[in-house]
Image (cartoon, helix red, strand yellow):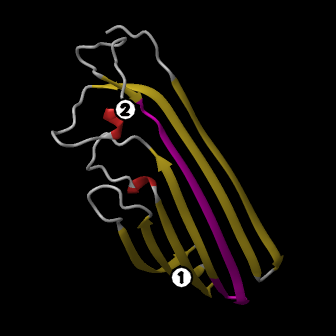
Amino acid sequence: MRVNSLTHVGHNRNYGVTASLAPRERFSVDLAYNYTDYLQNSLVCFKDAPPTGVTLPVVTNAGSCAAYDPTNNPLLTDGYYTNQTHYVMGLVVFRPVKRVTTKAGYSITSVGGNTPRFNSLEPDAALHYKYHQPSAAAGVDLRHHLTWNAAWNYYQHSEGTSDGPTAPRYFHANNTTVSLHYEF
């Protein structure tokens, strides 16, 4: 196969900041933010034809791959993929008495992105979703080096679009954990 030209642009950027504030011995706050930006953009030559009666914008707007191999790769298109992810978290830790520690927090992940749809049955929703997670926990020091812990997390995933043959996916769950922590 002869390749006359190839164009590719891409980056993966990640920025984050965290802060832990402890103004008093029995009270503290943790905060975090993270941003990820991903881009991949290449000319893509592929051999495919949609089923009869199906129109795909990617195929309709594709150019010729004559420079690559006209007998095996009839379609040339922009094979881009973008993804932007935001993550935010906050956690408050409070110790009402010396042997008891309580925690309450919340985090959210929000994702948005784009890619060409080579298949009309392919849902776009995996690139558009929000993931919520509130949490709470308590720990009690039973004796030296032994702590009883209880925690609760709620997970909620919801997709922000209904492109494709299915409705946006949604799920949630409540999780609890009880444990003993021993240090030696």
Circle 2 — which element?
loop
Residue kind at label 1, given as amino acid type: Asn
Location of residue 105 by image quarter: bottom right
In this picture, residue 55 sits left or right of residue 178: left
Q: Identify the residue under disc 1.
A: 149
Q: Where is residue 182 drawn, in percent x and y?
A: 54, 75
Q: Where is residue 154 drawn, in percent x and y?
A: 47, 77
Residue 93 sits inside the magenta stretch: yes
Q: Which residue: 22% across, 43% down? A: 54
In this picture, residue 32 sits left or right of residue 45: right
Q: Identify the residue under disc 2.
A: 61
Nearer to us in this view, 36 or 148: 36
Location of residue 125 by image quarter: bottom left
Q: Residues within 10 Å of mark 1 (few under 14, many from 20)?
A: some
Q: Which residues are magenta?
A: 78-102
Circle 1 — which element?
strand
Point out the residue furthest to the right here: 23
Residue 74 sits inside the magenta stretch: no
Q: Which residue: 43% across, 68% down? A: 157
Q: Nearer the viewer, mark 1 or mark 2?
A: 2
Q: Which residue: 26% across, 41% down? A: 55
Residue 144 visible in this rendered orientation of the protein: no
Where's the N terminus, which quadrant?
A: top left
Mark 2 or mark 1, which is nearer the start of the sequence?
Answer: 2
- Badge count: 2
Nearer to us in this view, 60 or 68: 60
